[in-house]
Each structure stands twice: as C-alpha cells, then as structure tokens.
Image: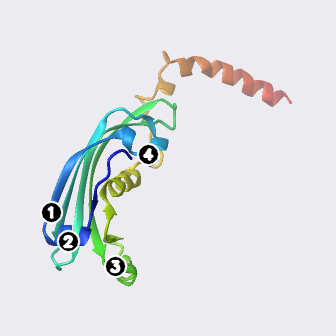
Amino acid sequence: MSAQLFMDPLDFARNGGTHHGKIALSGLERLQDYLTDNSGEVQYAVTGALNRNAKPMLQIVVRGLISLCCQRCLGKYPHALDLQADLLLARDENELARLDEDESVDCILATANMDVLALIEDEIILSLPLSPRHGESECSIDRPDSDTAKEKPIFAALAALKNLH
C-alpha cells in the first residue's frame, strides 16, 4: 500500500473524528487478486462516533467502480462499490469475545496504531460478491456475436468425441 494512515481508533471515536480521501486501486495490494484492472480509485470516509450505548465505533463509507472477473464468461465485470460499515470498537480481547456473541453488530479490536487504509481494504474485500457475474443478457457467453459463442461448436465437437470412447 503506497500511503498509510494510522490512528488511535478509541480516541478518534471519542472525539468524533472524521477523515476522507481517495485511494488508488493500484495501492490496495490484497485487492489485486480480485481485480481485472487496477486503474482508478475509490473514495472513502471514516467517521468516529459513540453509538446510542456510548460505545466507540467507526463508520466507514467506500464508493467507487472496480473491475472484477465475470465467473460465467471470464470477461471484465464492472462492480459499483457503495458500502457502509459500522464497526464497534473493542478495547481488549475479552470485550471483543463478548461483543462478537451478538451477531447483529460487527466489531473489531481497537489497536493503538490502527492502519485505516488496511481496514478499508478489508471492508472492500468482505463486500465483494462471491461469484461476480454479468446478467444473462449482458454476458458475452450468451451473445451469438461474441468470440466465446463462436467457440461453442468446437466444444460441442470435443464433447461428442469424448462420448465415443
């Protein structure tokens, strides 16, 4: 990751801090395995707050357009990121274990020097579809004029040969 942003998340939440900016997709190293093209950027905002129970939390918003690989045709699949995550901050492992029992909230361990950009990258990866695919009418494998569709008779002939033996 090219630039790094570290913060004390508990202090950031107590003070109602806010930070926003842009991240180049090429700078998100762990995300590269999911992308077909790493040009462009995503916009993010991180806001610290106390929830209604006076517990510290981070609100993360990420927006942008990324290119994934369609699992049907293996072509470029544009995916719009529009994610919002509310993360409760645990002060120690015991509090994290207790908070994790409630499945309705997401919580993380608040470390003194938390890497915010790594946290944003984690949230992007967690939000990705398990099997990204174009709609059936949009996928190049379903269009008769596509190169993939022209190869179908070849695969049908190979399947017929396989059935002979």
Cα distance in 3D space between marks 4 and 3 = 30 Å
For marks 4 and 2, the one nearer the N-term is 2
Can you identify the residue that label 3 sits on? Answer: 99
Cα distance in 3D space between marks 4 and 2 = 28 Å
Q: For the point 32% across and 52% down, which residue is it?
A: 4
For badge 2, the amino acid type reads Asp
Secondary structure of residue under mark 4: helix
For badge 4, the amino acid type reads Glu
Looking at the image, do the residues carrying marks 4 and 2 touch, with CB atoms under 8 Å apart? no
Looking at the image, do the residues carrying marks 1 and 2 touch, with CB atoms under 8 Å apart? yes
Secondary structure of residue under mark 2: helix
Closer mark to the observer between disc 2 and disc 3: 2
Can you identify the residue that label 1 sits on? Answer: 17
Position of residue 12 measured from the top left corner of the image (x, y, whole percent)? 19, 67
Secondary structure of residue under mark 1: loop
Can you identify the residue that label 2 sits on? Answer: 11
Cα distance in 3D space between marks 1 and 3 = 23 Å
Can you identify the residue that label 4 sits on? Answer: 29
Cα distance in 3D space between marks 4 and 1 = 27 Å
Query: Residue 148 appears in which quarter of the rendering?
Result: top right
